[in-house]
């Protein structure tokens, strides 16, 4: 026997390695990348990835590597847990502290029962928390060192691991992170679950597909010659006669070639298949070593030393002698605490060669040993099933399902619990797990299916359970869950309402009744049965408080608040939502939903400072609980963004939008991405067009269509294409209910386009009629009152209609300008531009100049490039001196033509607050500022950043930040943009040329 050592030189893979290094270099430079390495079994995927890891470590990368196993479909997050366990154990490494600081990740480490005890979220919410924690951990580590994360053998990955890989691929943008996944191409049959994942990922630009083809004959010869075993012995004869026969038999597969060579070196007859070839080498072992290898194969790809010793029943010396023989023949490799098969193909061949009775007996042995050691329930279930032990499989499957739900792996939880349901009737009552019942397991299975995004399967399971159930309390619980899942899926309102109604009728006075009432109120609201929803929510609140159902109480308070808002009692709605957010409900999803609505009501009614504060607290709660990417965590982030878009803090808005990915692939991602267009279009960013291209496939989604196509219409108008803008407007209007208040903004945009075209007629009149109807009517009749933003857009629509007809006198545009004066800085500026134009047409140059100058000042402070360009063009025609001439319009794309009324197609308005600048004096509003604060404010008004101000005034950036905070507080404003506007209004000007963005 000749001992082999690992190959030291990578042969025949220079092109593929260069592709991988390109992705690695991109990550090091700050562009996250993903590489998917595919190839047949034994083709060298692990070898090339090992080389990549070595090179990455030399370049300062932190490397994480986890391996899926054939059992992996039952073990959630196996490669993640594998990678984190290894990295966290490294003394002084950067990964350990980042993992232990996040409970969702710490729970994946062995022995962290405390982490599980802390967990309150399960299923989908726990998964969202885990995904967010992984992303956050990678971002933290990558802030100090670039990261390479390898997922090996994805063809065996569980559903949750596949979902995690997709999530990270879509979310990572500018982090210094490189993900690499390997998979067997020959295992991917037509219905393999990895196939659609690969197809989805390959469409993304940051993904590089690397296919490993068979090695050519020359490379194969060089590979064989590089092995140490050719230094002496039988290899000499092979050299003399060449490797032709081996190369021909191997077909370019390095592993197959190496096994052929090993067989020829042992003077074995060369078998016909790879499995036979590997088993021939196994047969050459001693009887004891061969039996130990077979036992190890039942454990899987890897096995711990102590577990193998107990399973084999051998003393230390005989076991060590057998293992030394196996390792020396490179059938197993030794690690720090156990052994692994050198290749998965070898483990599969040895396992498949076991006799049925032998296999059953060994699985039973491992099941007993793992049960004694407190092993993974999923592994226990696997071994019990293979040992035909149905009672043991039932108990372990139920436990595995509960644990998977806690770990945030709902798909695996559903799979385990479904298996338990299949086994239930095969197990006598005495062998069933204590404290469990078939209906309870079915409810948990349905909950897991819903959490995994399969509401259809969850609803079907509950319908079947409902037909079998005769206990009224159980029927009530089933009905409440069925209604909840149908509402979540926006599916069959009538069935949802009926199911919730039945639950209310059957539930006893208990937390169940409170939840049933809260869900019933939600379905009634969903069906626009507002009065019934309000009455039901009030009863839900009463029962929840009596029975201590805190989650139902918070849910009922949200419905009541929405009802009060629809009845125009905004103060009462705010009070109810304040109560809902005062203390945790025990359900993080409800807590985030309440905070979102609390912030939204303030925003929609013009209280922007309060809205920003509440939204920020909600975003912080989502981040602290790992739920940044949950439904309401995402909603809070885009609301926070919109608030800053409205209040004029566009720099803050763009910082938030940096996390709104451009390269979207799901509806949720597209919805979030579409919000970034507000500032991108407003500032004329070139990236807006790329974002719109990525969003185009999602225009069938109503929210994406409303947001993205609405901004696509504005983008087209700024670029002189009102016809395209009208196409977008008409497409959006076709999807909106006539009472939807969002319709008003879209109608106003369409009227802007028609005014630019100078086109009147039925289309023009119809848009205004629609806007007026939406402002006056809700889903159940006349609307009590429209919020300030809705009224402002209606005033804009009226003004644009007059502009199209040539009847837009200054008062029409003054009303629109003042309507946006509640704090919507940009839209006020756009209306003010038109006000200035209308004043010019009436011959009032003084008033026109004052309004124009205020609009220019705000547009420059915002960095609103298209609006600023349009204002400068109209100002040049009027002969006005530009107060911001030293600040060029930022990042504006070429485009824009003359409109029908002689203005720029950048349509919009001039802005600022009432009252123009008064040169040479500092009125009372600035009287409270110190001399240094006035200096700082003057530079803020010039658009300088804190660093630039500090350099000019020879003070630290931190000191500037303190001055700016004091200035905002003294002026009673919430953003630098508003402070700059006050400075210009009051005649305070700086001496420097600043960046106005």
Image (tube, rainbow, N blue to C red):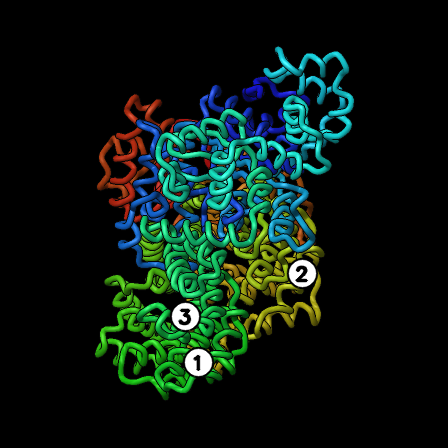
| 10 Å crowding of disc 2: few (<14), some (14-19), many (20+) | many
Comes first in the chain, label 3 or label 2: 3
Q: Answer above or below: position of 9 versus 186.
A: above
Mark 1–mark 3 Cα distance, whole angstroms, equals 29 Å
CA distance separating discs 1 and 2: 40 Å
Query: How busy is the neighbourhood of tag 3: few (under 14 within 10 Å), some, or many (20 plus)?
Result: many
Q: Looking at the picture, how far across and down is residue 556, in whole percent?
A: 33, 74
Mark 1, other Cα within 10 Å: few <14 / some 14–19 / many ≥20 = many
Is 52 in front, or is 737? 52
Q: Is residue 461 left or right of residue 985?
A: right
Residue 524 numbered mark, or none:
1
CA distance for labels 3 and 2? 60 Å
Q: Nearer the viewer, residue 879 or 910?
A: 910
Q: Residue at x 28, y 25 (%)?
A: 956
Q: Height in image: 47 above or below 139?
A: above
Q: Earlier in the sequence, mark 1 or mark 3?
A: 3
Residue 505 percent across, percent down from the top left:
37, 88
Q: Which residue is mark 3?
A: 441
- Quadrant assignment, res 870: top right
Q: Residue 414, image x and y in percent?
A: 47, 63
Q: What is the count of numbered marks?
A: 3
Q: Kindly identify the residue that appears in the image at 56 percent across and 64 percent down.
A: 797
Q: Quadrant of the N terminus?
A: top right
- Which badge, 1 or 2, comes first in the chain's sequence? 1
| SS class, disc 2 | helix
Q: Which residue is mark 2?
A: 754
**Left or right: residue 475 compared with residue 965:** right
Quarter of the rendering containing residue 969? top left
Q: Vertical placement of 13 versus 401: above or below?
A: above
CB atoms of marks 3 and 2 within 8 Å: no
| Residue at the (43%, 54%) spot, across then down | 364
How far from the left and from the top, in percent, is residue 97?
Answer: 31, 35
């Amino acid at each position: 026997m000749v001992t082999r050592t690992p190959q030291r030189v990578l042969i025949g893979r220079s092109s593929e390695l260069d592709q991988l290094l390109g992705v690695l270099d991109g990550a090091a430079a700050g562009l996250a990348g993903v590489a998917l390495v595919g190839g047949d079994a034994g083709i060298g995927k692990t070898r090339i990835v090992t080389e990549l890891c070595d090179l990455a470590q030399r370049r300062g990368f932190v490397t994480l590597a986890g391996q899926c196993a054939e059992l992996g479909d039952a073990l959630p997050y196996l490669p993640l847990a594998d990678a984190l366990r290894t990295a966290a154990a490294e003394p002084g490494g950067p990964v350990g502290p980042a993992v232990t600081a996040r409970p969702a990740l710490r729970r994946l480490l062995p022995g962290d029962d405390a982490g599980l005890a802390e967990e309150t979220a399960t299923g989908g919410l726990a998964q969202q928390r885990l995904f967010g924690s992984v992303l956050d951990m990678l971002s933290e580590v990558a802030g100090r060192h670039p990261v390479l994360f390898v997922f090996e053998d994805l063809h065996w990955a569980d559903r949750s691991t596949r979902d995690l890989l997709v999530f990270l691929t879509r979310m990572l943008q500018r982090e210094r992170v490189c993900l690499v996944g390997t998979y067997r191409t020959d295992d991917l049959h037509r219905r393999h679950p990895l196939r659609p994942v690969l197809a989805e990922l390959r469409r993304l630009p940051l993904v590089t597909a690397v296919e490993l083809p068979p090695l050519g004959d020359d490379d194969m010869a060089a590979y064989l010659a590089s092995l140490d075993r050719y230094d002496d012995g039988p290899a000499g004869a092979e050299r003399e006669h060449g490797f032709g026969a081996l190369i021909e038999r191997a077909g370019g597969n390095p592993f197959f070639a190496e096994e052929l060579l090993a067989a020829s070196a042992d003077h074995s007859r060369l078998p016909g298949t790879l499995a036979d070839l590997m088993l021939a080498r196994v047969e050459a072992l001693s009887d004891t070593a061969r039996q130990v290898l077979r036992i190890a194969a039942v454990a899987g790809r890897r096995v711990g030393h102590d577990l193998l010793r107990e399973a084999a029943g051998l003393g230390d010396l005989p076991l060590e002698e057998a293992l030394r023989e196996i390792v020396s023949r490179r059938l197993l490799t030794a690690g720090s605490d156990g052994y692994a098969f050198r290749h998965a193909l070898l483990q599969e061949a040895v396992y498949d060669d076991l006799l049925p009775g032998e296999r059953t007996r060994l699985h039973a042995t491992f099941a007993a040993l793992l049960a004694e050691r407190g092993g993974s329930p999923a592994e226990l279930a696997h071994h019990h099933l293979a040992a035909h032990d149905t009672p043991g499989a039932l108990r372990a499957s139920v436990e595995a399902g509960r644990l998977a739900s806690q770990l945030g792996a709902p798909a695996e939880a559903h799979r385990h619990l479904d298996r338990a349901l299949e086994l239930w009737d095969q197990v006598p009552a005495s062998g069933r797990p204590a404290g469990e019942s078939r209906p309870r397991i079915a409810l948990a299975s349905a909950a897991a299916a819903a959490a995994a995004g399969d509401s259809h399967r969850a609803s079907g399971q509950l319908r079947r359970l409902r037909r079998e159930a005769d206990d009224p309390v159980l029927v009530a619980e089933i009905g409440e869950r069925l209604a909840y899942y149908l509402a979540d899926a926006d599916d069959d309102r009538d069935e949802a309402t009926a199911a919730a109604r039945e639950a209310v009728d059957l539930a006893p006075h208990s937390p169940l009744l409170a939840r049933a009432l809260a869900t019933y109120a939600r379905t009634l609201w969903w069906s626009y049965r507002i009065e019934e929803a309000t009455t039901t929510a009030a009863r839900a609140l009463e029962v929840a408080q009596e029975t201590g159902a805190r989650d139902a109480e918070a849910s009922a308070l949200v419905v009541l608040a929405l009802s009060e808002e629809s009845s125009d009692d905004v103060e009462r709605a705010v009070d109810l939502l304040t109560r809902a957010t005062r203390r945790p409900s025990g359900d993080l999803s409800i807590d985030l939903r309440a905070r979102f609505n609390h912030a939204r009501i303030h925003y929609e009614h013009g209280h922007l400072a309060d809205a920003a504060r509440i939204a920020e607290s909600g975003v912080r709660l989502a981040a602290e609980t790992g739920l940044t990417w949950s439904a309401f965590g995402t909603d809070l982030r885009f609301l926070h963004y919109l608030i800053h878009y409205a209040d004029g803090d566009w720099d803050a808005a763009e910082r938030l939008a940096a996390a709104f990915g451009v390269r979207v692939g799901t509806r949720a991602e597209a919805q979030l991405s579409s919000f970034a267009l507000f500032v991108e279009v407003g500032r004329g960013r070139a990236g807006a067009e790329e974002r719109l291209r990525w969003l185009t496939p999602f225009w069938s989604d109503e929210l994406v269509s409303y947001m993205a196509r609405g901004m696509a219409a504005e983008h087209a108008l700024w670029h002189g294409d009102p016809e395209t803008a009208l196409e977008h407007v008409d497409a959006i209007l076709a999807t909106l209910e006539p009472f939807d208040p969002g319709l008003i903004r879209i109608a106003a945009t369409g009227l802007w386009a028609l005014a630019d075209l100078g086109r009147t007629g039925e289309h023009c009149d119809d848009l205004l009629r629609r806007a007026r109807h939406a402002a006056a009517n809700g889903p159940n009749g006349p609307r009590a009152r429209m919020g300030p933003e809705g009224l402002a857009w209606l005033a804009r629509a009226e003004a644009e209609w007059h502009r199209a007809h040539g009847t837009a006198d200054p008062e029409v545009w003054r009303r629109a300008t003042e309507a946006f004066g509640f704090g919507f800085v940009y839209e006020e500026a756009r209306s003010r531009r038109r006000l200035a134009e209308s004043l010019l047409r009436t011959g009032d140059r003084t008033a026109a100049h004052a309004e124009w100058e205020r609009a220019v000042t705000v547009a420059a402070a915002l960095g609103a490039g298209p609006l600023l360009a349009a204002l400068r063009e109209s100002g040049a025609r009027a002969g006005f001196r530009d107060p911001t001439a030293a600040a060029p319009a930022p990042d504006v794309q070429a485009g824009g033509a003359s409109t029908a009324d002689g203005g720029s197609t950048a349509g919009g308005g001039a802005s600022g607050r009432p009252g123009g600048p008064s040169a040479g004096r500092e009125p009372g509003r600035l009287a409270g500022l110190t001399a240094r604060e006035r200096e700082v404010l003057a530079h803020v008004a010039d658009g300088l950043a804190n660093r630039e101000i500090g350099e000019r005034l020879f003070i630290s950036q931190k000191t500037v930040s303190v001055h700016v905070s004091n200035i905002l507080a003294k002026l009673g404003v919430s953003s630098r943009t508003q402070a700059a506007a006050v400075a210009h209004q009051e005649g305070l000007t700086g001496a420097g040329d600043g960046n106005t963005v």
